[in-house]
Image: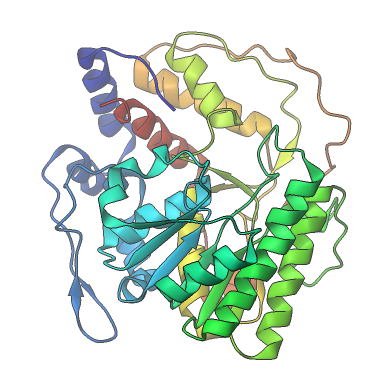
Amino acid sequence: MSVLLDVEQHDHLLQRIVAIHLSPRRRAGLIAPWAPPAYATTADRVVSALEMSPDHAAFRWLDLDVLAGSGGSDLVGRKVMVTGATGFIGAAIVHALAALGAKDLVALRRRSSDTYRLRSVAGLLEFVEVDLRNAAEVREAIRRTRPEVVFHCAVYGGVYGQADAEVIRATTVDGTANLLTALEEDGSCELLVNSGSSSEYGASTEPMRETQSLGATSGYAAAKAEATVLCQAAHARGRIATATVRPFSTYGPLEESNRLLPSLLRALLAGEAPKVGSGRQPRDWIYVGDLVELYFRVATQPGARGLVFNGGGGRDTTVRDMVETAVEVVAETTGRRIEPAWGAFPDRPDEPPRWCADMTRAADLLGFRTRTDLHTGVVRTVAFALDSPR
């Protein structure tokens, strides 16, 4: 998300964010020269991000100490492929691995994909253009790159406007099948972490558990559920291990510009009242940096293999919570409070009564708990938004 500010405005607002919201340790990391930590891998090899600029954006919105200790320090020593690397979650995973010092990182993308999210790390990646719907192309890409770990984040249908049912199914189901077949045939890949969707569950009045029956209510949700089943079947065949993460309401830097938080910040930082609905819609917000930590834990802990894990905050929250938090953070940052235009849009009639992840499995098996509350996550996103134009 870009916000047009002159240099003086930009510096003033960024300094206010640092001074008001962040701890002394984090504050030093934002406005003073960054001292990269050393991360010991299982082979006692020291990896750091020294080759990246100390003012690279990833050092400000990702907690690299946490990510390194949650499996990232192991992953940087492997050949890792990320499909859908130009999307929100895929790009966040790429930024995290690049910032931790990954040297063998493959970004799979469609020819038509916009790579703007990866421009700052493009020199650290091997880009491979491939259409996952084309089995021959996928087989050749895997034969040439031979990844050891794959984060499968390619998606169509999860963003507003992506509604072509044939493309949704071909990309999500056929694409996943083609990828799994190619990996099984090649034999070099140890693990694929599949990015599912909380929409696979359908509506639920209770926190959603990974073991409950699925009730997809859209073509996209049904396709994601089928892709998860394909991954589980591949795991059962024994030639490749798989696991699935089902993200809930993910937000943060690199998010699509037409989604809720970027839209709110674009209006608020421009001095305009954001137009919103009632705000009663249920969501389970999770900061993207926390979600990346979960992906890393799933990828590096043997007990995760063959299983599905929810990727949510495990709290009942709403759209109103996000709107009010964005208003508060921008007011504290700029000194100007702008009230949103509530009720400017009608609520969708198909909103579920509740949308909340049961995070027991991730806590018990992986030791995962979200670290970033909504206020802190929005602060980091505002800082990223202000810093991006530079």
Q: Residue at x 52, y 79 (%)?
A: 191
Q: Nearer the viewer, residue 129 or 92?
A: 129
- In the rendering, at what x and y percent does residue 282 appear? 74, 40
Q: Is residue 125 visible?
A: yes
Tell me which corner region of the image, top left, top right, bottom left or bottom right, holds residue 226: bottom right
| Residue at far top of view | 272
Q: Residue at x 35, y 64 (%)?
A: 105
The C terminus - image quarter: top left
| Location of residue 46 with respect to 99 vertically, above or below | below
| Location of residue 136 with respect to 201 vertically, above or below | below
Q: Is residue 142 left or right of residue 352?
A: left
Q: Is residue 355 visible?
A: no
Q: Is residue 289 left or right of residue 165?
A: left
The N terminus - image quarter: top left
Q: Nearer the viewer, residue 32 or 53?
A: 53
Tell me which corner region of the image, top left, top right, bottom left or bottom right, holds residue 176: bottom right
Q: Is residue 168 left or right of residue 337?
A: right
Q: Is residue 47 left or right of residue 328?
A: left
Q: Residue at x 73, y 81 (%)?
A: 233
- In the rendering, at what x and y percent does residue 324 appear? 58, 26
| Location of residue 106 with respect to 12 vertically, above or below | below
- In the rendering, at what x and y percent does residue 261 appear? 55, 30
How many numbered discs sit on the rendered protein?
0
- In the rendering, at what x and y percent does residue 263 appear? 55, 23
| Location of residue 194 with respect to 343 vertically, above or below | below
Q: Residue at x 73, y 62 (%)?
A: 173
Tell me which corner region of the image, top left, top right, bottom left or bottom right, holds residue 280: top right
